[in-house]
Image (cartoon, helix red, strand yellow):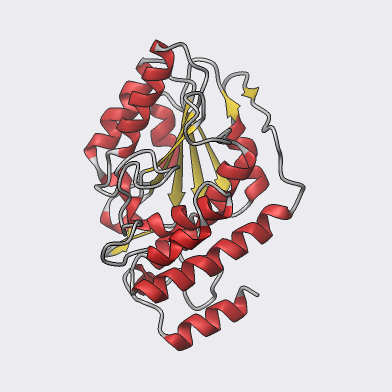
Amino acid sequence: MLTQATHTHPHPNPLPKGEGTGIARAIRRRVLQMSHAAHAPHLASALSCIDILVAAYWGALKIESPDDPDRDRLIFSKGHAAIGLYATLAARGIIAESLLDSFGLTGGTLAEQPIPHAVPGVEAATGSLGHGLSLGIGMAMAARIQKRDYRVLVVMSDGECNEGSVWEAAMFAPAQRLDRLAVVIDFNKWQATGRSQEVMALAPLRDKWQAFGWEAIEVDGHDIETLAAAMRMTTPGKPRAIIAHTLKGKGVSFMQDDNNWHYRIPSDADLAAALAELN
């Protein structure tokens, strides 16, 4: 439930209704191929957040040029799932599709964890979990100081909310009334070694963010249109926290909600079966 009036920021080129699902399916296919080719882990973590990235890049943020100083910023704080970010940037036309073939390879351009400015669209080095929100706050503060109108969106994992630095940042942003800042938490209920709630008492997650002074809502993290609408909204004087309920391994039935796929690499047979499901 919203506690204050909100403002909606329309996207200059909104997706036709229902089109985002097809884009997300194609990105998931590419992510599977990249993981298989590079023998790279964190596949399920990437699959859970693809709909969030599609909502952001096609439905909410204005990033027509990654060099534009007035572009909106997306900080991909769950850097271990960078394979999903790279495939999304390619699908959006921000980086060349051919670059994806270098993912995870020695001497390649795309590292398994994001390297700043290695390619357009990667705003910061992330993957040491708990730092992305602080980086986003710094960018939101910079926008205010420079009198720029861009917005900052930080995509986080639920396991990342174990970090104390997240909650220090979560206190600071409302104190500074950073209403051009939002976080989306990919709440897939798993982290590396177990259920998120069993490792650390995250619930009730929305209430925690709200208690820290954020405008906090919960959404279906695989409903692209609802996600995009939530990202386009701001509440005067308050940063925004979007708790996106997702499935780890989303899109592939034998990977969904199976934490073995946090580290497991798809075999030839796994890849063929997964691609068949996503056709």
Please identify the quarter of the rendering in which residue 265 is found: bottom left
Residue 98 falls left or right of residue 104: right
116 over 6 or under it: above or below: below
Q: Is residue 256 visible?
A: no
Q: What percent of the width, then of the height, locates residue 90?
A: 52, 54
Q: What percent of the width, then of the height, locates residue 122?
A: 40, 43
Viewer-side residue, 17 vs 158:
17
Quarter of the N terminus within the rendering:
top right
Please identify the quarter of the rendering in which residue 211 is found: top left
Residue 58 falls left or right of residue 110: right
The tally of labels here is 0
Which residue: 33% across, 68% down? 41
> Residue extending furthest bottom?
269
56 over 270 or under it: above or below: above
> Residue extending furthest right?
16
181 over 145 or under it: above or below: below
Quarter of the C terminus within the rendering:
bottom right
Q: What percent of the width, then of the height, locates residue 42?
A: 36, 64
Q: Is residue 19 visible?
A: yes
Residue 182 falls left or right of residue 138: right
Viewer-side residue, 35 vs 231:
35
Which residue: 35% across, 74% down? 260
Which residue: 44% across, 43% down? 120
Residue 144 falls left or right of residue 133: right
Q: What percent of the width, then of the height, locates residue 91?
A: 57, 55
